[in-house]
Amino acid sequence: MADYYPLIARAVAGLEKNTGDARRLVYERARTALVAHLRSAKLEIEIKESDITRERLALEEAVRKVEAEVARRETKEPPNIPRWEDSLLPAFSEAIKSRKPEEQARLNSRSKNVASARSRPSKNKRWKSVANATSSDYRR
């Protein structure tokens, strides 16, 4: 049984654009070439179907190893995708600057009211005390 990993890894490393589609094309070509080679050799020498299956499984194992390496590499190197905040921030800044001062004040006061409402303590002290109580507090 041959070791197909170096062959597949070298083919993937040589890709101009290492995308999933490009790798799948390499894998499909390798599968087709392997089966064609083994079938033609079967005519010249006696090769069992089980040997062909074993070679195909070895190729698939090499493909899995290469894909696992690519996945590990991609998780270590996050893609260079622009954040939406970076692209929208200038537009929002311009929109805020273009508003009238009284409208800006009204919007700012609303955001302060919302923030202060979140930080207020609960009005229902009885419920809060029940929620914080332990079972030992209810024993007599």
Image (cartoon, rainbow, N blue to C red):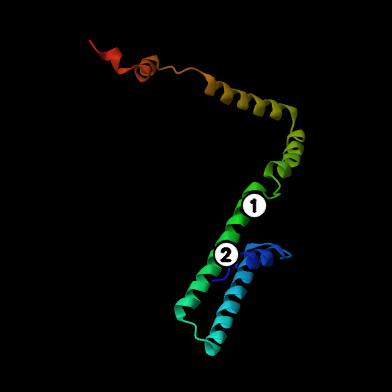
Residue 4 occupies which quadrant of the picture? bottom right
- Label 2, residues with CA under 10 Å away: few <14, some 14-19, many ≥20: many
> Are the residues flagged by discs 1 and 2 in contact, CB closer than 8 Å?
no
**Image spot of residue 111 (x, y percent):** 62, 27
- In this rendering, position of residue 83 left or right of residue 50: right
* Residue extending furthest toward the bottom: 43
Residue 136 occupies which quadrant of the picture? top left
Instruction: From this view, report whether residue 104 is shown above or below residue 138.
Output: below
**Image spot of residue 94 (x, y percent):** 77, 38
Q: Amino acid at mark 1?
A: Arg
Mark 2, residue position: 62
Q: Residue at x 38, y 18 (%)?
A: 132
Q: Residue at x 57, y 82 (%)?
A: 36
Whole-number angstrom distance, CA of label 1 to CA of label 2: 17 Å
State the quadrant of the N terminus.
bottom right
Instruction: From this view, report whether residue 49 is shown above or below residue 107.
Output: below
Circle number at residue 56: none
**Image spot of residue 77 (x, y percent):** 67, 48
Q: Amino acid at mark 2?
A: Ala
- Label 1, residues with CA under 10 Å away: few <14, some 14-19, many ≥20: few
- 26, 119: nearer the viewer: 26
Instruction: From this view, report whether residue 132 is shown above or below residue 21.
Output: above
Mark 1, residue position: 73
User: Which structural element holds mark 1?
Assistant: helix
Q: How many marks?
A: 2
